[in-house]
Image: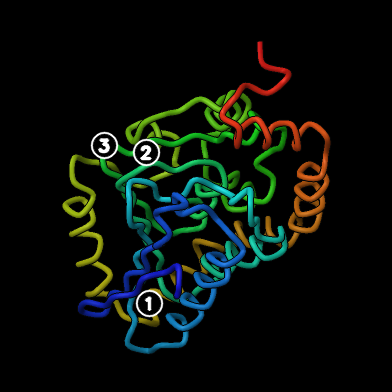
Amino acid sequence: MTTVRRSRERGITTLALDAPERRNALSARLVGDLADALAECGEDGDVRAVVLTHTGNTFSAGADLTDPPHPDDLVALLRRIVELPKPVVARVTGHVRAGGLGLLGACDIAAASRDATFAFTEVRIGVAPAVISLPLLPRLDPRAVARYYLTGERFDAAEAARIGLVTVSGDDADAVLAPVLDGLRRSSPQGLAETKRLLTAKVLDTFDRDAADLTALSARLFSSAQAREGMTAFLERRDPSWAR
């Protein structure tokens, strides 16, 4: 059974992360399923654009601590979204945490409903938002991202739009996405592909320059004693040893 649900309407393929019992955490399986689905969309001439969304009340809770993907696989997934010759549009109607924010950063456009919430929670379990910084740091407001990276604070959809994490927010994500999808349907495949290439060039430069170092950093941190304590505390629903 796949962890990604697919549907299509008038040239737009929707890929819904579909592991709500795990809060759509980025497991090795989900990362693989999503990468496969995106590859098929990229090769399908009838697909004008891709909408990436979710089932349940969480877009993604970040890395699955019981079945985490290899950092290289997460890098490959994020790069696939950025390099896909079709626009990828995120639709968020729930919570997004940690690694899930990397998916938003890799997408070309993102819309969130007002009840969506966001947080970079890596620091609270003893790691850093390393790999997901590849698409995020080139696109986010530097002062804001410093605050939210370092504190792990939760913020709302309006703030996510202000700092560049999402494109637009509103009471109804589908309502704010309607003109976006209409515009994509009216655009030529060649025009979309070449325009996306222009828009993502600097992001891909970051991948080329920093992916190896950030992958190594992620692996080192996740194998550290502090990360083991942080992840154990999270799974046991208690404060880690350093909390005051």
Looking at the rendered image, the disc whose residue lies closer to the viewer, 3 or 1, is 3
Please state the horizontal and vertical placement of residue 26, each as a whole percent of the image: 55, 56
Q: Check disc 1 and report the residue beneath it.
A: 191
In screen coordinates, is 35 left or right of 228?
Answer: left
Q: Amino acid at mark 1?
A: Gly
Please state the horizontal and vertical placement of residue 114, each as a whole percent of the image: 26, 37
For the N terminus, the image quarter is: bottom left
**How many badges with numbers are in the image?**
3
Q: Quadrant of residue 151?
A: top right
Q: Residues within 10 Å of mark 2 (few under 14, many from 20)?
A: some
Residue shown at the point (25%, 60%) measured from the top left: 180
Please state the horizontal and vertical placement of residue 145, each as a whole percent of the image: 56, 32
Please determine whether, in this image, residue 47 is positioned above or below residue 200.
below
Give 36 or 193, whichever is nearer the viewer.
Answer: 36
- Label 2 residue SS: helix
Q: Amino acid at mark 3?
A: Arg
Q: Check disc 2 and report the residue beneath it.
A: 161
Q: Earlier in the sequence, mark 3 or mark 1?
A: 3
Give 24 or 162, whichever is nearer the viewer.
Answer: 24
Q: Amino acid at mark 2?
A: Ala
- Label 3 residue SS: loop
> Disc 3 and disc 1: Cα gap in Å?
32 Å
Q: Quadrant of residue 91?
A: bottom left
Q: Earlier in the sequence, mark 2 or mark 3?
A: 3
- Label 1 residue SS: helix
In screen coordinates, is 68 left or right of 193?
Answer: right
Residue shown at the point (50%, 73%) measured from the top left: 84
Question: Residue 114, which numbered label?
Answer: 3
